[in-house]
Amino acid sequence: MNVIVFGATGMVGQGVLRECLLDPDVTTVVAVGRRATGQSDPKLRELVVPDPGSLAAVEGQLVGFEACFFCLGVSAAGLSEAEYTRLTYDLTLGVARTLVRLDPTMTFIYVSGAGTDSTEHGRIMWARVKGRTENALLALPFRAYMFRPGIIQPLHGIRSRTPLYRAGYAVAAPLLPVLRRLFPRQLTTTEQVGRAMLAVAKHGFPRRVLEQRDITAF
């Protein structure tokens, strides 16, 4: 299986990339993003692009892939709804529309988040925008799955690039393994998310939207 990973330098993207490189069923991984991952592996090829939402210059290198794991995302803190929409909805749909045009048989897996608002009309801004993004992806003519993880514990040296999240994980790190044992359906890890995404890409899933309980079941 040949796969594309968008956002492979982020926390979730690092976890997905790690699992892809370890999986014997994965032959080629193309990581697309604004910066290189810094990793070296025979399976890995990198496309560093100034704007991941504008892929015209590299379209020819995105043909022949069975799955795309879209892990790009930004925190909504300090952003207006218009700016967050541009960085979330517009960017994601720009990529998805390009890929579905290149190959409508591809599986597209989008990392959303627990609490996403499918109605698009709730009070929480980020949840509305994520819900609108999910709905638009599900309307496209390819196999799209939405992943809604909750609290994610980074493993294997993976760190979030968001300073606020890094600080939170540093404080909570001693408690997370205990909380995972006590509440196994409420918390997950970067490893578990990556493996779940690969499993869905290979075998599908009965539902198009996977909540935390679905992710932790893999």
Image (cartoon, rainbow, N blue to C red):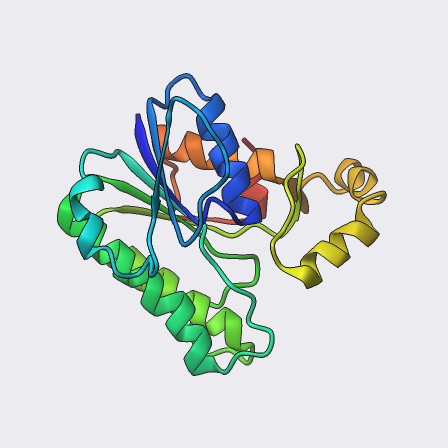
Quarter where residue 29 is shown? top left
One can see residue 58 in this view: yes
Provide residue 131's location: percent of width, then percent of height.
Answer: 43, 66
In the image, is 69 to the left or to the right of 166?
Answer: left
- Residues 19 and 123: in front is 19
Q: Nearer the viewer, residue 119 or 28?
A: 28
Would residue 28 appear left or right of 161 to someone viewing this image?
left
| Residue displayed at 68% across by 47% down | 186
Q: Quadrant of residue 206?
A: top left
User: What number of labels is visible?
Assistant: 0
Quarter where residue 183 is shown? top right
Tell me: residue 194, above or below residue 114.
above
What's the residue at 46%, 44% (across, down)?
8
**Which quadrant is the N terminus positioned in?**
top left
Q: Residue 6, position in %: x, y?
A: 39, 48
- In the picture provided, is 198 more to the left or to the right than 161? left
- Image point (30%, 61%), residue name: 53
- Residue at the limit of the structure toward the top, as seen here: 24
Residue 102 at what x, y percent from top left? 15, 46
Q: Is residue 107 above or below residue 82?
A: above
**Which residue is pictured at 80% across the width and 43% down the height?**
179
| Vertical side of 83 occupied by 24: above or below | above
Q: Decide if residue 140 is in sight here.
A: no
| Residue 195 against residue 48 in the figure, above or below | above
Instruction: List x then y, in percent, for residue 91.
Output: 34, 64
